[in-house]
Amino acid sequence: MKIPVRLLRLLKDELYLFTLSNEPTNNIKVAAIDDDRIANDELVISIGTTETVSLIGLKGISADQWYRNIVMHDLKYDIKDLLDYAPTLAKQVSGKLPVNSLYEDKYQRIEGIDKLLVNDFEEIISNTIRRDRSKHPQISIESILKEISDIDKQMINIAYLKKSK
């Protein structure tokens, strides 16, 4: 399909003006591709997709979110993408980051992932958590969920439980 150069130049100018002002014009509007307000005969240009989450967002994942995801499964990234990022995140948090819940043999070629596989629960517990366990009197997951209503505080307190709990 050939597109006239005049049309491409107009598109370039309109897109440039839109990026400067972030205001729709007569020729450029922003809407989802499946928006009913877009007529079937209008020229549509799609940049990105609505079904996938940007991988750039992975750089914003914290260790807290990683641990929460182990329990809640609430990160919206592909498992391979998470495992690709895991060694980088682990370097930021003392080298400890459990990946076992996501890992499968097909991901063994990811550089540094083998160092993050945990064989014993105590391997992932930081010295700070070991030292501060006495400050967190809950004795089981059930007691934490019963006594603490804030889900973030629940996740923090679960980290202080011993392996047997």
Image (cartoon, grey):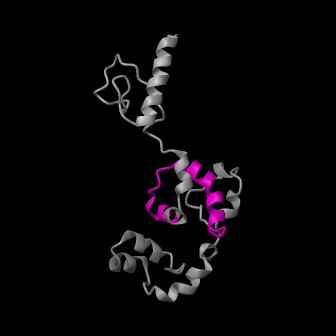
Q: Horizontal and vertical percent for residue 44?
A: 41, 23
Task: Indicate yes or no whether the magenta region holds residue 20.
Answer: no
> Magenta stretch: dominant SS?
helix
Looking at the image, can residue 40 be seen?
A: yes
In this view of the protein, which residue sits in the foreground, 32 or 107?
32
Q: Is residue 23 above or below residue 127?
A: above
Q: Horizontal and vertical percent for residue 103?
A: 60, 56
Query: Is 70 left, or right, of 29 in this rendering?
Result: right
Looking at the image, can residue 117 be seen?
A: no
Q: Is residue 159 above or below residue 24?
A: below
Which residue appears at 50% of the width and 49% of the height?
77
Query: Is 143 left, or right, of 94 in this rendering?
Result: left
Task: Indicate yes or no whether the magenta region holds residue 79.
Answer: yes
User: Which stretch appears magenta?
Assistant: 67-96
The quarter holding residue 59 reads bottom right
Q: Is residue 60 above or below residue 1?
A: below
Q: Horizontal and vertical percent for residue 164?
A: 52, 80
Which residue appears at 28% of the width and 27% of the height?
37
Q: Horizontal and vertical percent for residue 150?
A: 35, 72
Q: How many marks?
A: 0
The quarter holding residue 96 reads bottom right
